[in-house]
Amino acid sequence: MENYKIKKAADILYNSRINLKRIKELPKECIPKSLEEAYAIQDELTKRYLSTNQKTSLIGKKIGCTNKAAQIQINVKESFFGNMFSDNISKSNSIIYSYKYFNPFVEPEFSFVMKNELDFSKAPYNADEVYKFISAVLPSIELVDSRYEDWTSIGVNNLIADNAVHAHWVFGTEISNLNLFNFNNHSVDFFINEKLIEKGNSNNVMGNPISSLTWLINKLALKRKNLPKNYYVSTGTCTRAIPISKGDNITADFGNLGKVSFIYK
């Protein structure tokens, strides 16, 4: 895809995000036909967002569709990743205002903080190697939302271009002792208005959220990119993506890792 078409697609998605107006689809000539084109549009969208908002910065990555239930929901067959920005995050127990979003879903996710930057030239890494580069784990909830009117049928390339449908990230308290947790089997209970909606598990995230992080690091290495020190990575949902409504009180209980909550007002 020519560069001007990539920029045109990014501008359309950016304006949709800023003006809170959904689109049915991108113009035919701007629809990404490959993962390479999709990530090129995402990169351009990220540049556009950062250049027009001097108060924000990149703080991490999100990984999407790391389990079959989530993939089935939006008719994709693979995981993907996007960017997280400093002006789209909130501490636990915050209020998140509904007017900023179209039709969000929420996902309880294990998030990690990178201790050091891995050298992409030494990839591929395995999970044991990546484990040593994690400084902390924290409970989190990702809000996902799309600029497309029907994002269940738009296809993975379009979702990637739309910054992997990332909308907001709510985070709990960091814990540096990773040995306290069995990431192969760690339960997560998800509540809306104090009612248990779904029970999830860390093993829904590519078998283990560290496997998800490893997948991301190796994917980025193919692009000759690293995860910088102190970057956050939200590793993918432990459940299906769960719809929310205005007025809902949302809580994800990660057991000994802690809880993370917010009110959707």
Image (cartoon, grey):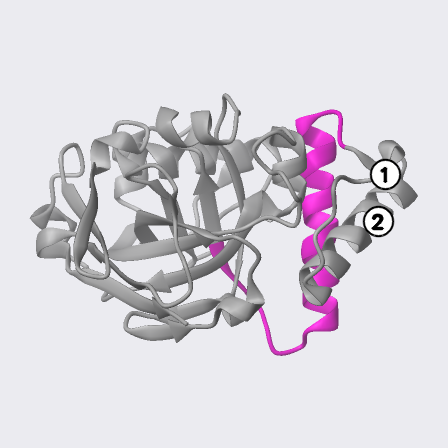
In the image, 194: left or right of 151? left
Residue displayed at 81% across by 55% down: 11
Task: Check the image and report above or below for 17 versus 239.
Answer: below
Looking at the magenta stretch, what is its main secondary structure? Answer: helix
Q: Sequence-wise, which precedes: disc 2 or disc 1? A: 2
Q: Nearer the viewer, residue 198 or 195?
A: 195
Residue 103, label in figure: none
Q: Position of residue 263 (x, y in %)?
A: 33, 69
Quadrant of the frame with the C terminus: bottom left
Residue displayed at 11% across by 45% down: 181
Residue displayed at 44% across by 33% down: 65
Task: Check the image and report above or below for 68 versus 145.
Answer: above
Magenta stretch encompasses residue 47: yes
Q: Quadrant of residue 186?
A: top left
List the residue tagged with mark 2. 7
Quadrant of the frame with the N terminus: top right
List the residue tagged with mark 1. 27
Q: How far apart, in angstroms, are the residues tagged by discs 2 and 1?
A: 12 Å
